[in-house]
Amino acid sequence: MSSARLEVIERYCKGCSICVEFCPKNVLEMDVFLVKVARPEDCIKCMQCELLCPDFAIKVHDA
Amino acid sequence: MAYDYDKSIRPGKLPHIWCPGCGHGIVMKGLIRAMDTCGLDRKNTAIVSGIGCASRLPGYLDACTLHTAHGRAAAFATGVKMAKPEMTVICCGGDGDGTAIGGNHFIHACRRNIDMTYVIMNNFIYGMTGGQFSPCTPTGAKASTTPYGNPDPVFDISKLAIGAGATFVARTTAAHPREIDKLITMGIKHKGMAIIEVLDDCPTTYGRRNKFRSVVDMMKHLKANAVPAVAASKMTAEQLAGKFLTGVLFQEERPEYTAQYAEVIKKAQGA
């Protein structure tokens, strides 16, 4: 499977941590108040983070 | 790969005003995807809302939008549809706006079976005005005006809509994003009144008073207690206690109001 590139728009992110909790592969981490992409190589592109982000702040791109 | 929401949002409007973790943003994304799936022309789509957190939604969308008086979304939307029956009309609002203050407009729009889609975001509380209890606040839950627990029984919005005569009624939750756009798409395509109830989370005014420690707790609660209507038929009443049914709950075909009214116009003009 081709790898993914995750884009976090920091200006939009409010740090609700929904994406961190619902990621099945534990790709994301909280960095104090914002989301940080910690392990992008584990991403399986299930799109849960993008679908569940209420703030339009995370996007999953094909690498 | 990433979905392009930006083309449907008015430039410069993001970030939105909703609190961190508020499910309204998830519903807005679902609505955008549904509108794209239906191929709606934004010049021919009216999105109408009343007052409240959920009613801020049309302000962000690039379409013909109308932000109206509290609870009167269905009334204004009926007006738009009557004047321009060729338009696609979508209503947005919260539970307080739709079923308390606008309760009458809501049931009568259902009764007429006018062709519109009402996306009603049920977050169990009046969020914007400071967390007062709404008709959808669960019995026993705490709100700013019920500090000892809410004594009132709850409105079941979907059952209310079915009883009032809506011809497409569906329910989902903010924790089921794919189902949101699937049901809204079905609602838009349905000829007649479509009610899509989306159970939502309000961490700021509901969650923190009701022992949900975080947004994630609320989302997990919604996810864990949703039972597809198809599966529920095989479950006992005990198993269903405290759960809510999701999916399409009711669907029927009945004459649509603007078509009926066109007949009246024809008769009146002596054709």
Image (cartoon, coloured by chain):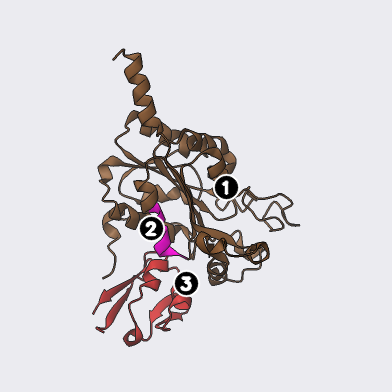
Amino acid at pointer 2: Lys
Could you tell me which residue is drawn at 40 percent across and 41 percent down? B116
State yes or no: residue B181 in magenta: yes
Give the left or right position of residue B240, taking residue B28 as reference: right
Q: What is the x, y in percent for residue B156? A: 60, 50
**Camera sees residue B204:** no
Query: Is the residue B267 above or below the residue B130 in the image?
Result: above
Could you tell me which residue is drawn at 53 percent across and 44 percent down? B162
Disc ID at residue A18: 3
Q: Nearer the viewer, residue B39 or B205?
A: B39
Amino acid at pointer 1: Lys
What is the crowding at mark 3: few (fewer than 14 residues within 10 Å), some, or many (at least 20)? many
Estimate the spatial distance between the alpha carbons at disc 2 and disc 1, rounded to whole Å.
20 Å
Residue B259 position by quadrant: top left
Chain identity of mark 2: B
Question: What stretch of residues is rendered in magenta?
Answer: B176-184
Mark 2 and 1 residues: CB-CB less than 8 Å, in contact? no
Chain identity of mark 1: B
From the image, tell me which residue sits under label 1: B159
Mark 1 and 3 residues: CB-CB less than 8 Å, in contact? no
Estimate the spatial distance between the alpha carbons at disc 2 and disc 3, rounded to whole Å.
22 Å
State yes or no: residue B135 in magenta: no
Mark 2 and 3 residues: CB-CB less than 8 Å, in contact? no
Residue B85 position by quadrant: top left
Rendered shade, chain A = red
Chain shaded brown: B
Give the left or right position of residue B227, taking residue A34 as reference: right
Give the farthest residue toward the top.
Answer: B270
Q: Are marks 2 and 3 on the same chain?
A: no
Query: Is the residue B226 above or below the residue B109 in the image?
Result: below
